[in-house]
Image: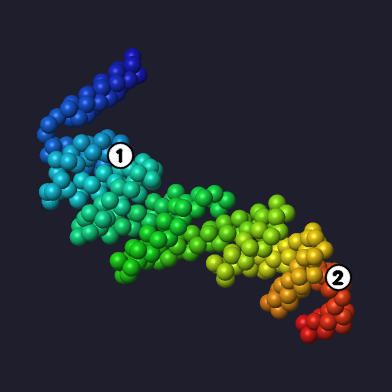
Amino acid sequence: MKKYNLLLIVCVALFLSCGGYERLLKSTDSNLKYKKAFEYYNKGDYAKAGTLFEQIASFFRGTTKADSVYFYQAMTYFKQNDFILAGHAFKTFSDTYGNSPFAEDATFYVGYCYYLTSPRPELDQADTYQAIQSLRLFLIRYPNSDRKEQCEKMIAEMRDKLVEKSFISARLYFDLEDYKASIVALNNSLSEYPESKYREDIMFLIVKSNYMLAVNSIPGKQKERFQSTVDEYYSFITEFPESKYRKDADKIFESSSGYLGTDETTFNEINTEQ
């Protein structure tokens, strides 16, 4: 019986609570809705708070309360993990209320929302680029912000993701045995990210791509392409003389030199210098 009474009390309380919220939604008292929206927000009921903020946004537009309504409306989206909608709302707020006490937070959350929606490296990186751009803009506007270190770490993380994306995309052409496209893509990756942590891998793949392109070329183009292979080999071993790919690179060099009729002493001199 006691359990039944307790359950009944809970159900009644829930009914009255829901009924009160439903009546509040139908109310024309925007000031009451404003007050209750913050009460729901502070209790962690972001869905109800968000609905109330949406209802009163137009009423408070142009008033001293407008920025708080729009900012916390955006925060309710963020708290519900709707980072796409939140990012858009924060961007609109940042562009509209640049002098608001909430402006710094809003500008930060624009970049942070893009950071949170940035996908794994294999996928399209539009949000990653937007995250970097937005976070850099935040640092320009607020160079002394307490969030500076956090922003710099996120930017570095996003840049590493772009480096990985660039390498994965370039390597894909090699894996597909499209060696001409592989050479272009790998060189573009190095040009865009010269400090890439994949630099050694990329430079070796450039050597190998040139070699495979030469091997699979018509006789009239082989000499030029084997020469390109040798040239890339020189660049590679100069920068990475102790590379994990050295043995494979040396074999490619020997094969290419054999086709070109290069004196074997050239290869021996190279290894002696290393």
Q: Identify the residue at image location x=33%, y=16%.
A: 4
Query: Mark 2 sits on what residue?
Result: 259
Residue 145 lies, in percent from the top left, at 32, 66
**In the image shown, does 236 or 183 lie closer to the viewer?**
183
Q: What amino acid is labelled 2 in the image?
A: Tyr
Q: Going 75% across and 68% down the picture, which residue do you hit?
A: 225
Depth order, front residue of 47/136: 136
Q: What element carries label 2?
A: helix
Q: What kind of residue is marked 1?
A: Tyr
Most distant residue in the top direction: 1
Q: Which residue is drawn at 33% across and 58% down?
A: 108
Image side of residue 239 versus residue 83, left or right: right
C-alpha span from label 2 to label 1: 71 Å
Farthest residue, direction front: 220
Instruction: Please say if 256 is above or below 34.
Output: below
Q: Do the residues labelled 2 and 1 touch (CB within 8 Å)?
A: no
**Which label's residue is closer to the chain start, 2 or 1?**
1
As helix, strand or loop, the secondary structure at mark 1 comes to helix
Is 106 placed left or right of 57 in the picture? right
* Discs 2/1, front: 2
Camera-nearest residue between 226 and 137: 226
Q: Which residue is drawn at 30% across and 47% down?
A: 89
Give neighbour class at mark 1: few <14, some 14-19, many 20+ (Cα, 10 Å). Answer: many
The x, y position of residue 180, in whole percent, is 69, 60
Disc 1 target residue:
46
Question: In this picture, is 55 found above or below 250?
Answer: above
Residue 2: x %, y % from top left = 32, 18
* Quadrant occupied by the N terminus: top left
